[in-house]
Image (cartoon, grey):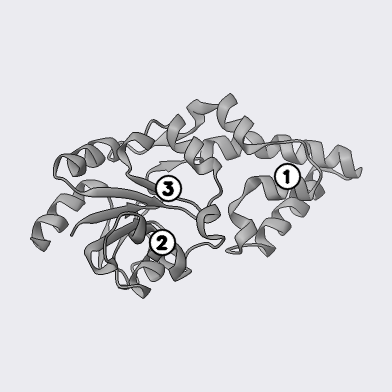
Amino acid sequence: MDAIFFDIDETLLSERALVMLFLPQVYERLSKKLGISRGDARLKFLRELSEKRDKYEWHDWNFFFESFGLDFKYEDLLKAYPHKIRVFPDVKPTLEWLKEEGYRLGVITSGPEYQKLKLRIARLDKYFDVIVTREDVKTVKPDPKIFLYACEKLNVEPENAMMIGDNLHQDVYGAKNVGMLAVWINREGLEDYNFADFEIRSLHQLRKILGGLG
């Protein structure tokens, strides 16, 4: 195994606290703009999110802000509330160990360019040799193109690369479809579908997996 790729959200870090902070502001602003109740504004915004789920646009908060004519910018929210981005405690020790062991590390995200800002704010960007966003290939996971592009950037064959992510469809199916080894990080103990090559609850378990691969 030469290279290891990671998803970002709910794999390396969580933006949930930030989302819970700005969504009430979004509903309030939308309510005033459209002259409807806050509850109706919430339903309207969430319905739009639901309809775009897993499509290209779904991965970009700014798309939804712009769709409703709201003057929010996700980059500004990240900069204003950096403490709301929570890095999981197993992340930095694992990345440091992987670097020491000589693995090439990368990120594959369906998000836009602001994902790089998120990694910088979390002080994780320094660990990665390449960070591939949807902007690089104009597509999102599980499209094979984004995985193959990332492998090409690290000059590694897919069969010598591993993908770690929390989403069975985007991360696990997408990686397996191009011949990569797929690891499902199941932090919340969801039902196992025996689809991933490996299932882990913590990134610390990667040491055992990689040790077993020789």
Amino acid type at circle 2 is: Tyr
Disc 3, SS: loop
Image height of 190 relative to 111, above or below: below
| In-image side of 136 versus 10 (left or right) | right
Going 78% across and 36% down the picture, which residue do you hit? 28
Mark 1 vs 2, N-terminal side: 1
Image height of 38 relative to 198, above or below: above
Q: Which mark is residue 83?
A: none
Q: Which mark is residue 149?
A: 2
Q: Which residue is mark 1?
A: 65
Q: Please provide percent x and percent y for residue 49.
A: 67, 56
Image height of 104 relative to 119, above or below: below
Q: CA distance from mark 3 to mark 2?
A: 17 Å
Quadrant holding the N terminus: bottom left
Amino acid type at circle 3 is: Ile
Toward the viewer: 99 or 27?
Answer: 99
Q: Which residue is mark 3?
A: 8
